[in-house]
Image (tube, coloured by chain):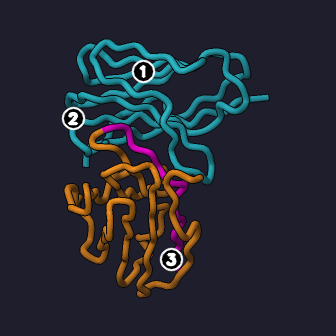
Chain colours: A cyan, B orange
Amino acid sequence: GQQLNQSPQSMFIQEGEDVSMNCTSSSIFNTWLWYKQDPGEGPVLLIALYKAGELTSNGRLTAQFGITRKDSFLNISASIPSDVGIYFCAGSPGNEKLTFGTGTRLTIIP
Amino acid sequence: DTAVSQTPKYLVTQMGNDKSIKCEQNLGHDTMYWYKQDSKKFLKIMFSYNNKELIINETVPNRFSPKSPDKAHLNLHINSLELGDSAVYFCASSQDRGPQHFGDGTRLSIL
């Protein structure tokens, strides 16, 4: 099945640093979603994007829907310890089928 | 007031057994899903139901059979469990083609 290429695979940062991750696809999507998964829990929706070029913020998180509709970016500013987890992008061509990225594992070094 | 709830949270069983996982959502959504997350954390859709009708059926062994008694419930029955079935299974729901909301997962371990 199709996978979305998500990078980086893992990040080790210090508290207070900004974080950037991205997701690319070989096909066009009409919806991009970003989720965060904590250990032992299910993915939790962070941001939903519905229009090419759209830039949406949720607190310290900002995500963008790429103009080509084949990529999306997530930025986290001034990271804090509770940002630790696995971040997933997910794309949909406009139906119920959601394809997930390979995940970015974020670790904060004390 | 859990939105999407799955039971059991943990399931440990022997190869060859048959088991079921239950899912319920109280969000009033009309579409429900089952996903499998492997040991590398890759999430892949298995099935989707819209108002009790199967709309997505990915390449999944026919040992896996979903059942939706009503639009708030989607259960997953697995026959003749194999070692490769060990994974975390997530239920999710959405309203139409809106964002999907996930349960906390069922960790299935096959001995």
Residue type at the position of mark 3:
Ile
Q: Is residue A92 left or right of residue B23?
A: left
Rendered location of residue A81, percent (x, y): 73, 30
Q: Quadrant of residue B65?
A: bottom left
Question: For mark 2, does the 10 Å Cα neighbourhood hold few (<14), some (14 to 19), or many (20 or more) residues?
Answer: some
Marks 1 & 2, CB-CB < 8 Å contact:
no
Rendered location of residue A65, percent (x, y): 34, 19
Q: Is residue A94 left or right of residue B6?
A: left
Question: Residue at coordinates 25% horizontally, 63% vertically from top-left?
Answer: B52
Which residue is labeled 1 in the image?
A73
Check the image and report above or below for A2 versus B31.
above
Which residue is labeled 2 in the image?
A93
**In this view of the protein, which residue sits in the foreground, B73 or A94?**
B73
Residue A32: mark: none
Helix or strand or loop: what does disc 3 sit on? strand
Residue type at the position of mark 2:
Pro
Q: Quadrant of residue B82?
A: bottom left
Residue type at the position of mark 1:
Phe
Question: Residue at coordinates 61% horizontally, 44% vertically from top-left?
Answer: A38
Rendered location of residue B9, percent (x, y): 58, 66
Residue extending furthest toward the right? A110
> Mark 3, chain letter?
B
Region rendered in magenta: B98-111
Which residue is labeled 3 in the image?
B110
**In this view of the protein, which residue sits in the foreground, A24 or A91?**
A91
